[in-house]
Image: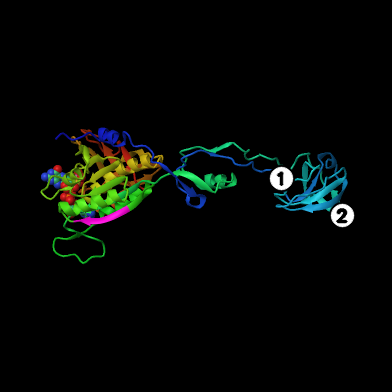
């Protein structure tokens, strides 16, 4: 079977992947969620002309002359209102956030007055009419569109939604990702391993990638290399409402690589299998109705690279989240040979020298080597049949620094 080019595989993976439905969540749980409906202001803010300072509210026409005296006829703090009307030559002691009393339009800050006599202040400086007042609706007016649909909710958006008097928000549902590791040799971390056994590491990295892309995780553990055991976990994933089933291992051509057979028997229609990439060649993708199935290769680095390149963008689409690979130009720290027909993702050390990004490929690129992967700041992307490059030449790097 001809290997599928990387771009074709990505296009097919994302072809009809759009945001899942929505759910309403309390504001306190809405951080890092994607807004499913625009947020409009249910009220105006501030809802009244409000004092921006601690001082004295007065008429603008009374505060233009230093040395003038005003009678203090009352006091008002934030949270209350002043029932009377302030006349010429009068003022009201006021505190930040309090509504301006009727008749006033200006606040003189307290630093600019002195007490001339009990109940009388004297202006030490002039104040321009209208100063130190926040007009009603300065921030927003009832009905204003405040936050657009599709926005990832961060701190300011959440405070804004709260100020606009929304206790709950409609957000895009997080995709649920079921993860199934396959292989007789696998045991969970913390186990005593016997002959021929290793620790199942892939689900942890896969889950972290999925979480970073906004998904919820259902780790279904390890299926031994038996069709019935693998089928049972796939059924469990479907029953739990998984939007994406991710398998790890068993994707290749060995006698014990059962994933394709099992997924097909559970109703998956294969879309593509075997990509012109390294690592990650045996990657498989198909659909079981609305459930997407991603068969990741078992080699630990391949499973991580494929999670970064395929799982994350897929989950971002389903969750309505923005996503873009962080690809930058770097300078090669060592020469590289010509590439073959597979797009290569070469683990590289990244450093900044004299303001330039230097990418140096690790000597050994075996796709089992997690230590190298964990030390790699990025993956040098080598197109199929790319020519040999000398140290010092530019290359493209997919930066992982903040993600791995
Ligand atoms: N004749 C061929 N053999 C292989 C090919 C091929 O094209 N022809 N492809 C190779 C490539 S590339 C890869 S990648 C692997 C992937 O194959 P599978 O997806 O079937 O993976 P397994 O055979 O199950 O495992 C491969 C390797 O990874 C280890 N593994 C598996 N699961 C985990 C896990 N959860 N945690 C840690 N390590 C895991 C497993 O023990 C094996 O060592 O196939 C090549 N072979
Ligand atoms: O391409 Mo495999 O995915 O070498 O590790």
Q: Is mark 1 within 8 Å of ligand 1?
A: no
Q: Which mark is residue 119?
A: 2
Q: How many marks?
A: 2
Between disc 1 and disc 2, whose residue precedes? 1
Can you tell which quarter of the image residue 192 is in? Answer: bottom left
Marks 1 and 2 sit apart, C-alpha to C-alpha, by 23 Å
Q: Residue at x 24, y 49 (%)?
A: 247
Front one among 68 and 246: 246
Query: Where does the magenta region start and end?
Result: 218-223
Image vertical order of residue 142 relative to residue 72, above or below: above
Image vertical order of residue 6 relative to residue 365, above or below: above
Q: Are marks 1 and 2 in contact (CB under 8 Å)?
A: no
Mark 1 element type = strand
Q: Which mark is residue 77?
A: none
Q: Closer to the camera: disc 1 or disc 2?
A: 1
Magenta stretch containing residue 219, yes or no?
yes
Quadrant where the N terminus lies? top left
Residue, disc 1: 50
Q: Is residue 7 visible?
A: yes
């Amino acid at each position: 079977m001809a290997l599928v080019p990387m771009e074709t595989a990505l296009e097919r993976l994302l072809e009809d992947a759009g945001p899942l439905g929505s759910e309403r969540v309390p504001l306190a749980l809405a951080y890092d969620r994607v807004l499913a409906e625009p947020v409009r202001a249910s009220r105006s803010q501030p809802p009244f002309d409000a004092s921006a300072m601690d001082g004295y509210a007065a008429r603008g026409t009374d505060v233009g002359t230093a040395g003038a005296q005003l009678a203090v006829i009352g006091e008002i703090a934030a949270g209350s209102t002043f029932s009377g009307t302030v006349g010429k030559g009068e003022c009201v002691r006021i505190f930040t956030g309090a509504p301006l009393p009727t008749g006033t339009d200006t606040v003189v800050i307290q630093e600019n007055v002195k007490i001339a006599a009990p109940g009388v202040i004297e202006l030490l400086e002039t104040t321009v009419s209208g100063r130190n007042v926040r007009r009603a609706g300065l921030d927003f007016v009832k009905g204003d569109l405040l936050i657009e649909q599709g926005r990832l909710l961060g701190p300011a958006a959440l405070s804004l939604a709260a100020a606009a008097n929304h206790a709950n928000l409609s957000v895009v549902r997080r995709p649920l990702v079921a993860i199934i590791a396959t292989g007789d040799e696998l045991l969970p971390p913390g186990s005593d391993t016997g002959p021929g056994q290793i620790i199942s590491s892939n689900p942890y990295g896969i889950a972290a990638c999925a979480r970073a892309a906004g998904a919820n995780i259902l780790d279904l553990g390890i299926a031994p290399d038996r069709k019935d055991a693998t089928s049972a976990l796939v059924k469990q994933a479907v029953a739990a409402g998984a939007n994406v089933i991710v398998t790890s291992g068993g994707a290749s051509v060995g006698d014990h690589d059962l994933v394709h057979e099992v997924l097909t028997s559970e109703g998956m229609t294969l879309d593509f299998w075997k990509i012109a990439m390294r690592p990650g060649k045996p990657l498989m993708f198909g659909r079981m109705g609305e459930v997407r199935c991603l068969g990741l290769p078992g080699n630990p680095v391949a499973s991580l690279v494929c999670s970064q390149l395929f799982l994350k963008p897929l989950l971002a689409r389903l969750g309505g989240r923005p996503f873009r690979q962080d690809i930058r130009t770097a300078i090669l720290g060592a020469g590289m040979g010509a590439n073959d027909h597979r797009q290569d993702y070469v683990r590289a050390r990244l450093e900044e020298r004299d303001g330039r990004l230097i990418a140096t490929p690790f000597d050994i690129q075996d796709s089992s080597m997690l230590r190298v992967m964990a030390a790699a700041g990025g993956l040098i992307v080598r197109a199929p049949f790319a020519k040999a490059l000398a140290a010092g030449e530019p290359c493209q790097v997919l930066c992982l620094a903040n993600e791995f």
